[in-house]
Image (cartoon, helix red, strand yellow):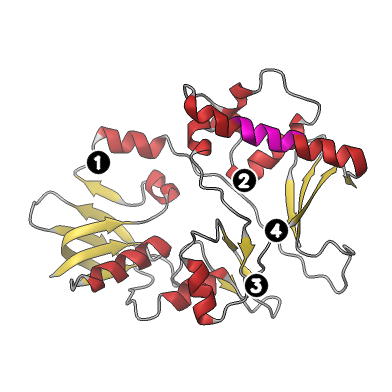
Amino acid sequence: MNDVVIIGAGAAGLAAAAEVAKAGRRYCLIEAQPWIGGRARTDRATFGLPVDLGCHWLHSPAQNPFTPLAARFGFRVRSGAQAEAFAWNGRVLGGAQAAEADAYVESCFDRIIAAKSEPDRPVSALFPDPGPWHALFEDAFLLKQGLPSSATSAHDFASYVWEGDDWPVVDGLGDLVARAAEGVRAELSTAARRIDWRRADRIAVETDRGTIEARHAIVTVSMGVLQSGVIRFDPALPDWALGAIDALPMGSMNKIVIGLRRNMFGDLAHSLWMSSAADRQAAECVI
């Protein structure tokens, strides 16, 4: 019997497996998908270049554990700040309008950080008298969170570690996660269906390929998977845990990759656009 069964081979599950192995314990790592990395997945076939289908930034790179790994394994990253621009109804803002919009959006994010010392409330409640550029802030916030400001805790966002610029991994963050996980054993295409934790001396995890027993279990699947109920806990999780799961909605972001034959953006290499419109269909364009 294994010491630990780990469910989910995203970055958290892979790190858990490495730590368990380092402690000299036996583990079994299972993953429902036929690949490791979870939402970190790089596609090289479609465009002939590495394209991350999910996450692709090294967020807060000075603290991110994948930053030194990228250097160690020779993965190219695009370091430094992105040139930022705002667009409204198909027109890129320039001059005084651009400066005014940028200053207003930054002031709104500063207001959220300052709210950490105040009673918690939705982010939207911090702006009872929104300025003329508030729609751009709302869209910028939505693009960061995947949820509108009315559905987001001010304390939660104020606690967000946001230091330095986000660095895209040119050679693919998904491939970097997979490279860092070499040597970690994982059973792929093995979905957990039921976790039996009725006994104090063992956990039994029922999967599509049979039952796995271990003394302990580490569950690293996404909040969306937990909320879907596809993994059943027996007995059910306590009310405090179920309440916490239900209270943490997953944001939804659609990612579209477009291959261009020529540079249509002039000197705006390595830039980030926040594009908004009157119909409130926000888009973030990363070059």
Amino acid type of the residue tagged 2 in the rendering:
Lys
SS class, disc 2: helix
Give whichever of 118, 36 is nearer the camera. 118
Work out whether mark 4 precedes mark 1 in sequence or the reverse, and give the earlier one: 4
Residue 49 location, quadrant: bottom right
Q: Which mark is residue 81?
A: 4
Residue bearing mark 3: 170
Residue bearing mark 2: 144
Cα separation, mark 4 vs mark 1, equals: 44 Å
Work out whether mark 3 precedes mark 2 in sequence or the reverse, and give the earlier one: 2
Amino acid type of the residue tagged 3 in the rendering:
Val
Q: Is residue 136 above or below residue 150?
A: below
What is the number of callouts on the image? 4
Give whichever of 95, 49 is nearer the camera. 95
In the rendered view, does 264 fall on the left or right side of 193? right
Cα separation, mark 3 vs mark 1, equals: 41 Å
SS class, disc 4: loop
Q: Which mark is residue 237?
A: 1
Which callout, 4 or 2, points to the residue nearer the camera? Answer: 4
Amino acid type of the residue tagged 4 in the rendering:
Ala
